[in-house]
């Protein structure tokens, strides 16, 4: 099974970050913003045209380009843990 990326997570659905497949400097900056393994991330909304997309993480909203979100790998959902968040 191919791991799901943050770029493919539907709006309003929560995902748990597994790892950041990014250069160290970019990964470090995202971790400072709350994108840490084990943290829940929820896609909130997109700009017109779809990019950037705003994600809710650790009490903040952060906009990411699709190419960056595609390098954030989510954990497979655990049974019974998949919940849709109403935004």
Image (spheres, rainbow, N blue to C red):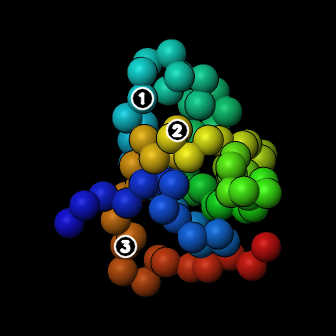
Instruction: Point out which mark residue 22 bears.
Output: 1
- Neighbor class of circle 3 (other Cα within 10 Å; few <14, some 14-19, many 20+) is few
Residue drawn 79% across and 57% down? 48
Farthest residue, direction left: 1
Real-space Cα distance between discs 1 and 3? 25 Å
- Is residue 76 visible in the rendered structure shown here? yes
Quick one: SS at disc 3?
Answer: loop
Real-space Cα distance between discs 3 and 2? 24 Å
Instruction: Point out which mark residue 78 bears.
Output: 3
User: In this rendering, is residue 14 above or below 84?
Assistant: above
Q: Mark 3 or mark 1, which is nearer the start of the sequence?
A: 1
Q: Quadrant of residue 35?
A: top right
Q: Mark 2 or mark 3, which is nearer the start of the sequence?
A: 2
Residue drawn 61% across and 41% down? 65
Q: Find residue 32 and report its horizontal and vertical position in percent.
A: 63, 27
Real-space Cα distance between discs 1 and 2? 8 Å
User: In this rendering, is residue 42 above or below 67?
Assistant: below
Instruction: Point out which mark residue 68 bears.
Output: 2
Quick one: SS at disc 2?
Answer: helix
Quarter in which the C terminus is drawn: bottom right
Quarter in which the N terminus is drawn: bottom left
Q: Quadrant of residue 2?
A: bottom left
- Is residue 37 visible in the rendered structure shown here? no
Residue drawn 73% across and 42% down? 62
Instruction: Point out which mark residue 36 bears.
Output: none
Q: Is residue 19 left or right of residue 40?
A: left
């Amino acid at each position: 099974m191919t791991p799901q990326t943050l770029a493919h997570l539907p709006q309003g659905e929560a995902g748990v970050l597994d790892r950041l497949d990014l250069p160290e400097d970019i990964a470090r900056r995202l971790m400072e913003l709350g994108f840490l393994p084990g943290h829940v991330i929820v896609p909130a909304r997109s700009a017109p045209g779809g990019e950037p997309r705003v994600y809710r993480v650790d009490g903040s909203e952060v906009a990411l380009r699709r190419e960056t979100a595609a390098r954030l790998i989510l954990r497979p959902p655990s049974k019974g843990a998949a919940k849709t968040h109403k935004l």
